[in-house]
Amino acid sequence: MSNPIPEITPTPANNDPSSTVQSQELTSPALAQRFRGYFPVVIDVETAGFNAQTDALLELAASVLTLDEETGLMSIDETIQFNINPFEGANLEPKALAFTGIDPTNPLRFAVDEDEALKSLFKLVRKKMKLAGCQRAIIVAHNAAFDLGFLNAATERCNIKRSPFHAFVSFDTTTLSGLALGQTVLAKACVAANIEFNNSEAHSALYDTEKTAELFCYIVNKWKTLGGWPMPTIEE
């Protein structure tokens, strides 16, 4: 389980206040052009089961990305993470808790309610999305349907009417890494991409989000270096 984060106000991942200003300066309209106006946000959730409607959402982490205007390469801009209190009446599957190692009753988790976590996340995403000139955020995740399902279910439970994320479109790094690296398991895909991966730290939302973000950036950047982006202009 990841280290508890008592504050819910998003802070730069390196704890340097100046990095937010620097990352904003690096954000370019080129990112808006890269994915047809979509703003990619890497998400990972840890849950108390597989059913998004009944099982508790326990951890949520997100990495927003930036595209360097000069190099055209993508990298992690900022990462935030929340430990989350189970919603009222939520199911807690013992096997799921044993797998993740999360104790929802531990006060040292400094957990917040779903509503607080989502509103903080959405505020950050809208801010970064506007800077990038994008119109809609899109979730990037490993087995994205799972994470998007829990994100959508929590949004509905909290009666949040407007989410910055597309309701069903996603970028799935399982598929992308299968194509680019011949691997579909996150740990194996990272190894194939020469991204350090520590299995003892896996299955925390924060760690898995940052590793998924590194993997997504690697694939996008590799495609560029191979000449796949920008698309060649076809003369008529």
Image (cartoon, rainbow, N blue to C red):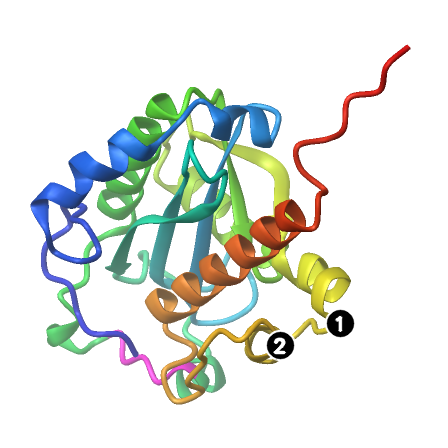
Give the structural element (helix, strand or loop) at label 2.
Answer: helix
Q: Position of residue 5 (x, y in %)?
A: 15, 63
Q: Give, as a single range, the part of the protein colored magenta.
A: 100-104
Q: Quick one: 165 or 224, which is closer to the camera?
A: 224
Q: Is residue 201 above or below residue 79?
A: below
Q: Residues within 10 Å of mark 1 (few under 14, many from 20)?
A: some
Q: Which mark is residue 192?
A: 2
Would you place residue 65 above or below residue 50 in this image? above
The furthest residue to the right: 236
In the depicted structure, whether residue 85 falls above or below residue 103 = above
Would you name the residue on which mark 1 appears? 182
> What residue occupies the far top of the structure in this picture?
236
Question: Taken as a whole, is the magenta stretch helix, strand or loop?
Answer: loop
Residue at screen point 50% across, 38% down:
72
Q: Secondary structure at mark 1?
A: loop
Residue at figure coordinates x 76%, y 28% from the top left? 232
Task: Kindly check if marks 1 and 2 are in contact, taking CB atoms under 8 A apart as contact.
Answer: yes
Comes first in the chain, label 1 or label 2: 1
Q: CA distance from mark 1 to mark 2?
A: 8 Å
Q: Circle 2: is it few (<14), some (14-19), or many (20+) Cα within 10 Å?
A: some
Percent x, y of residue 33 = 56, 24
Identify the amino acid type marked 1. Answer: Gly
Amino acid carrying label 2: it is: Ala
Q: Quadrant of residue 87?
A: bottom left
Position of 102 with respect to 72 (left or right) is: left
| Figure quadrant of the N terminus | bottom left
